[in-house]
Amino acid sequence: MNRILAVLKNKAVKSNEPSKGSNILSDYDTYTAKKISFIVLCSVLVIFTAMIALTQGSYGLSIKEVFLALIGRGTRITHTVVWNIRMVRILSAIFAGIGLAVSGMIMQNILRNPLASPSTLGVSHAASFGAAFAIVAFGSGRISSHGGSAVTFTMPYLIALSAFGFSMISTSVIILLTRFRDATSETLVLAGVAMGSLFTAGVTSLRYFAQDEVQLSAIIFWTFGDLGRTGWTTAMIIAIGSTVASIYFFLNRWKYNAMNGGENVARSLGINTEKVRIIGLIVSSMITALIVSFVGIIGFVGLVVPHMARKVIGNDSRFLIPASCAVGALLLLVSDTFARTLISPIVLPVGILTSFLGAPMFIYLILKGRHNW
C-alpha cells in the first residue's frame, strides 16, 4: 500500500512540473518581448528627442511656446520657427535616417557582407557626381547665402534629378555583376568601392573645371550632408519613399531570414534568391539615391546603424528591419540636433557629425563583434 501511495505521489509531482514545450514557449515570449521593448524604447526616444529638438536652436523656445505653436495658438514668429524651419528639418532627419538605415541593413543581408552599404556600393558617390555635374554643366549651382544661413540652390530639383540618375547608374553596374554566377558578395562590394572611387575622381575633375568660385563652393557644400535645404515638399517625398521601402522590406522579412541561412537553404525553401537580391538592391538603392539627391551625402548611417541594431536584436529580419528604422531615425535626429546647437548660431552640416561619430563607432563594433556575423 505504501509503494502504491509513493508512485501516485511521484506522478502528481511530475504532473505539476512545467513541460518542455511550455519552457520553449516561455523562452520565445521572452525573446520577442526583449526585441519589441527595444524597438518601442527607440521609437519613444525619437518622439522625445523631436520635442526637445523643437525647442533648441539660435531662437530659443520653451516647451509651452512649442506646444502653443503646434496647436496653432502661438505667435507668428514661433509658428514660423516651429512649423516652417524646425519641424521640416526634424521630419527630414527622421525619415532620412529610416531610409538610409533600412537600405544598409537590406544590402548587408542580401549580399551577406557586413561592409555592404550605400556608401561602399558607390550609390552615394555617384549621386555626388550627378549633383556636381548639374551644378557645372547646367548652371544650377548659382547660390546665395543670407546672414549665415544654409546655402540655397536656384534649381535644386534639377540637381536632385541628376544625382538620382547617376546613382542609379552605379546601381545598374552592381546589378549586372549579380547576373554573373562567379560574382560573390565580396566582388560586389569591391566593385562598389571601385565605382565610388571613379565617381569621386569625377567630382574632383568637375571641381577643377568649375568656372568660378561660386560653382566650386556649391559643389563642396552639396557634398556635405545638410538637412537645412529641405522644405515641406522635399520632406514629404523623403517620408513617402522611406515608408514605402520599409513596408516592402518588412513584407519580405521571411525571405531575408531564409537568405540568412545561405543560398542553398533559401533555394530549398522555394525562394528565388537572385530575384530577391536584385529587387532588394534596386529598392534600397532607389531610396538611398532619393535621400542623397535632396540632402547630400550623410555618411555611416547605412553602414553603422544595422550593426548597432543587430547587437541587440540579432539577425532576425522580423525585428531587425523595424529596429534599424528606429535606431536610424534616432541617430540622425540626435546628430542633426547637435549640429544645430553645438556652436550656435552656426549650423554644421549633419554629414560632418555623422562621419565623426560613425567612424569610431564602426571600429568599436568591428573589434567587439567581428566573430558574430
Image (spheres, helix red, strand yellow):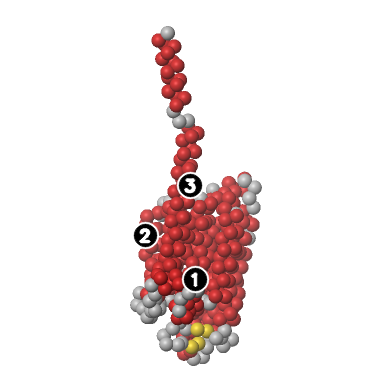
- For the residues labelled 1 and 3, the Cα–Cα distance comes to 37 Å
* Residue 333 percent coordinates (x, y): 44, 68
Which label's residue is closer to the chain start, 2 or 1?
1
- Look at label 2 and name its amino acid: Tyr
Determine whether the residue tagged by mark 1 lies in a helix, strand or loop: loop
Residue holding disc 3: 32
Q: Is residue 192 above or below residue 20?
A: below
Q: Amino acid at mark 1?
A: Ile
Mark 3 and 2 residues: CB-CB less than 8 Å, in contact?
Answer: no
Amino acid on which disc 3 is placed: Thr
Q: Can residue 20 be seen at all in this image of the molecule? A: yes
**What residue appears at the point 49 percent right and 91 percent down from the top-left corner?**
212
Residue at point 45% right, 51% down? 37
Mark 1: few/some/many CA within 10 Å (<14, 14-19, 20+): few
Which of the two labelled residues, at mark 3 and mark 2, occupies the earlier sequence position?
Answer: 3
Which is more toward the observer, 132 or 146?
146
Of the pair 317 and 205, the residue shown nearer to us:
317
Front-lying residue, 10 or 130: 10
Kindly identify which residue carries mark 2.
364
